[in-house]
Image (spheres, rainbow, N blue to C red):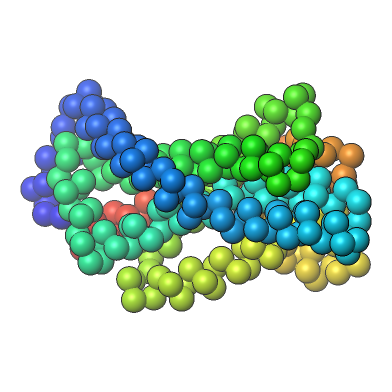
């Protein structure tokens, strides 16, 4: 991005920047709509099979306790929100900065660099919200019924939003910090710990017999998405207090956004 282009975008009137932001977001949403079946297949396949095998097959065979699917379902909602947000932003951003240089077209739009990054984050969060919402009817289809409390819906929606933003924040950091040649390796190194230390398959308080692993999972921000969703849907299962989950998620999202936007500025100038 040239200095002249940077000056032009920053000095554009707020109304014009807002219109440009809306236009870019609308375009991204339209592209997603035209590719909706492919998008849903990409983001739902993995949690669908995890839900089917652990929640249906193993339960039917007697290898898991009765009611385990009720404990598992909120965790897979959390996994879907975080992973979808991360995938939606990380891979395309690495490609746009590294190979296609498509990001340059967005940086030349009449809006600030911060707004370009914000649009990326908002778009990734919206896709993650859609994918997580779709998992609810999928859960009913696979399991026959899911744990549901109407009084817990506000907390569930808040957890879905924060989880989606957390995933988008992780994607922004990865997308601006990793080169195209290393993104697959780095993503694998990030994804596996997220999957197995994010309390998607077990509640955090149940790890008292493994204190070292309890500390490890407490360092994974996805744990607090899983725990807040369990608090919303299955409050009888021991869980971390919702206010703690929300506080940790807000702090984590703020930190990731600050790091990611700084990296976005650096890559944009380069």
Front one among 204 and 87? 87
Which quadrant does the C terminus fall into?
bottom left
Q: Residue at (40%, 70%) from the top-left corner?
A: 183
Q: Quadrant of residue 93?
A: bottom left
Is residue 223 shown left or right of residue 134? Answer: right
Which quadrant does the N terminus fall into?
bottom left
Front one among 133 and 203? 133
Front one among 216 and 92? 92
Q: Residue at (33%, 63%) from the top-left corner?
A: 94
Query: What percent of the width, then of the height, locates residue 117?
Result: 33, 46
Is residue 246 shown left or right of residue 175? Answer: right
Query: What percent of the width, then of the height, locates residue 22?
Result: 29, 30
Q: Is residue 28 visible?
A: no
Query: What percent of the width, then of the height, locates residue 268?
Result: 24, 56
Q: Is residue 143 above or below residue 215?
A: above
Counting labels gives: 0
Query: What percent of the width, then of the height, locates residue 144?
Result: 77, 41
Q: Residue at (23%, 53%) from the top-left corner?
A: 103
Q: Is residue 101 visible?
A: yes
Q: Is residue 200 above or below residue 133?
A: below
Q: Residue at (21%, 37%) from the top-left corner?
A: 111
């Amino acid at each position: 991005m040239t200095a002249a282009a940077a000056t032009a975008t920053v000095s554009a009137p707020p109304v014009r920047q807002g219109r440009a932001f809306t236009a870019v977001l609308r375009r991204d949403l339209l592209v997603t709509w035209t590719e909706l079946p492919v998008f849903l297949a990409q983001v739902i396949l993995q949690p669908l099979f995890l839900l089917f095998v652990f929640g249906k097959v193993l339960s039917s065979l007697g290898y898991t306790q009765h009611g385990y699917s009720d404990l598992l379902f909120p965790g897979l909602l959390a996994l879907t929100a975080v992973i979808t947000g991360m995938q939606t932003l990380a891979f395309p951003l690495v490609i746009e900065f590294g190979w296609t240089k498509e990001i340059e077209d967005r940086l030349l739009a009449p809006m600030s660099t911060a707004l370009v990054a914000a649009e990326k984050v908002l778009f990734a969060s919206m896709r993650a919200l859609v994918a997580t919402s779709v998992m609810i009817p999928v859960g009913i289809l696979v399991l026959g019924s899911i744990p549901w409390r109407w009084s817990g819906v506000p907390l569930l929606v808040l957890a879905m939003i924060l989880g989606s933003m957390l995933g988008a924040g992780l994607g922004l950091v990865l997308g601006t910090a990793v080169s195209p040649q290393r993104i697959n390796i780095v993503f694998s190194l990030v994804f596996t710990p997220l999957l197995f230390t994010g309390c998607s398959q077990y509640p955090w308080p149940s790890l008292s017999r493994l204190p070292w692993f309890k500390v490890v999972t407490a360092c994974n921000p996805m744990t607090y998405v899983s725990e807040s969703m369990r608090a919303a849907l299955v409050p009888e299962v021991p869980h971390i207090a919702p206010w703690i989950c929300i506080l940790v998620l807000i702090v984590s999202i703020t930190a990731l956004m600050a790091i990611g936007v700084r990296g976005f500025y650096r890559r944009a100038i380069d």
